[in-house]
Image: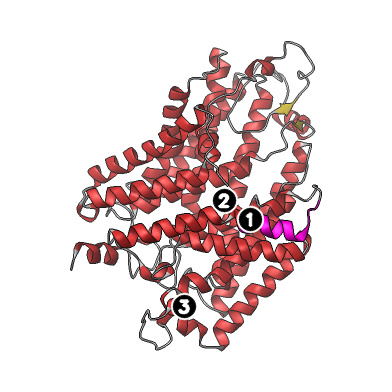
Amino acid sequence: MSEKQLKESFVRNLNGTSITEITLGLSITPLCILFRGLIFIYLYQNTGKVVYSWKYCLVLDFFLLVLPQVLSCTILSDYLCLVVVCVSVMCTLGFYMIYNNRIFYKNTYLLNVFQCFLNTTIEEQNVPSVTNFRVFMNLLTAICILAVDFPIFPRRYAKTETYGTGIMDLGVGCFTFANGLISPEARSQNKEKTSTFHTVEKQIFAVWPLIFLGLGRLISVKAVDYHEHVSEYGVHWNFFFTLALVRVISSSLLTFIPVQKIWIVAIVIIFSYQIVLETTDLKTFILQSSNNKDTRHGFLNANREGILSAIGYVTIYLCGVQIGSYLLKKRIYVKEWIELLVKFTIFSVMAFFSMIIVQIYVEPISRRMANLTFCIWTIGQCMAWLCKIFLCDLILVFVKYLIPGSSVPNTWNICDKYSHQKNAPHLKCRKKKFCLIEAINRNQLLFFFHSNIMTGIVNLLVDTIRSNSLSALIVLLTYMFLNCLISCILHVSNITVKWW
């Protein structure tokens, strides 16, 4: 086989891993966020200083946030349970040390402190957990799109051929859900309504960068004869075209249907799609083409997976909008956010139970078709991941409550009993502190774009499928550090690359 055929066969005919392993792997992200936050608070508690050097913070954030993700996808992939336990123990130890060394509430029982904390008010109206969710989804995607070409990346994590669950199968679904979560429709519940025509026109105009990037990827891949997994989207279709199509269809539906009722439309769409899959030849067409020989003649036939799976992704997007509209409502007290976390946790558990039932009585999960089971799994997995991040964020807020004046980037600030004092400890930390999460969040589409470019460059320069573990790990860490460095330089230079 040619080099291109070897690389294509390297990522084909895979069956994925268990949902338990994926859920366990995604638990590392919130634990890393928590551990990093506890380190910041512990350093402040013992030195009384806050470090603002962006270079120092970049290195610290890279080692605490990015490195564990890379290792968990590669050399530590067989020891995920041990990794989760170790990080959890370090977080527990960090919390214990901070709590024991506190000055305020020194003689107060933890339960009493917590009861007072429930009535504490939150200053910001944004939700840091949503930002963390979107940024780490982008980071994991950037890691996986290059790591999958190296033997060090477990084949069970790669995208499945027809049925199954790999960590990379969540990619487009997570992006779609995240886009719905912070969509204009989800964020504009309390804003003045604009005309229908203006809304549709604005949404169509907003997707042109995705179409431009999709065309750029298509032309570049064909020009350099880059290896492709054709059954993923098709011959000409790609990730960017799917996001653009989903955005246009969903925004058009949301123009005429109230956000509060959009979950009904989502259910109707996905159940209708599944019924058609089960009662017609549509499933055979998607998996084997119109002549059952997996030919790629004609535009629809050549790109059948990408075009038809958009139906499932529209469902995921609409559910994201529905959840986002509820999540982004104004809440003042900590106890209100805890109540929200409990509701979301119950919802995610129900989604997993529903997925098990549908798997048994309908069909297994298939990213290739984006069937009913896949949509339920994606939404449930995203909600579970978001809840874990949410929980860790609330723990950090509680620790900050114990240590007035402490600061953790990209977390809530609280209004406590010291806020009215002129020399309140926490007022000394109002200076903006560098944060890798905020740097990536500032230019998320650009981060994904240059990650794809560097992935292509590495594949053209490096014999990835014959690389040993050490060289693969060095390449991956260098690649991720450069991606983070680009975002950081833009952030500290106050540059936002958005021309639409």
Q: Is residue 10 magenta?
A: no
Q: Note whether residue 302 is visible.
A: yes
Q: How is the image coloured?
A: secondary structure
Q: Which residue in the protein does label 2 denote?
A: 385
Q: What is the distance, in whole Å, between disc 1 and disc 2 at their CAs?
A: 16 Å
Query: What amino acid does circle 2 point to?
Result: Trp
Element assignment for label 2: helix
Disc 3 and disc 1 in contact, CB within 8 angstroms? no
How many numbered marks does the figure carry?
Answer: 3
Residue that extends furthest to the top in the rendered view of this protein: 423
* Residue lying at 61% horizontally and 19% vertically, measured from the top left: 431
Say which label, 3 or 1, has the lower sequence index.
1
Is residue 244 positioned above or below 136 on the image? below
Query: What amino acid does circle 3 point to?
Result: Leu
* Residue lying at 32% horizontally and 51% vertically, measured from the top left: 456
Q: Which residues are magenta?
A: 193-204
Q: Which residue in the protein does label 1 denote?
A: 180
Q: Note whether residue 21 is visible.
A: no
Query: What amino acid does circle 1 point to?
Result: Gly
Q: Position of residue 358 (x, y in %)?
A: 58, 74
> Could you classify mark 1 by the number of other residues whose Cα lies within 10 Å: few (under 14), some (14-19), or many (20 or more)?
many
Element assignment for label 3: helix
Is residue 358 positioned above or below 405 on the image? below
In depth, the one of 207 and 424 nearer the eye is: 207
Disc 1 and disc 2 in contact, CB within 8 angstroms? no
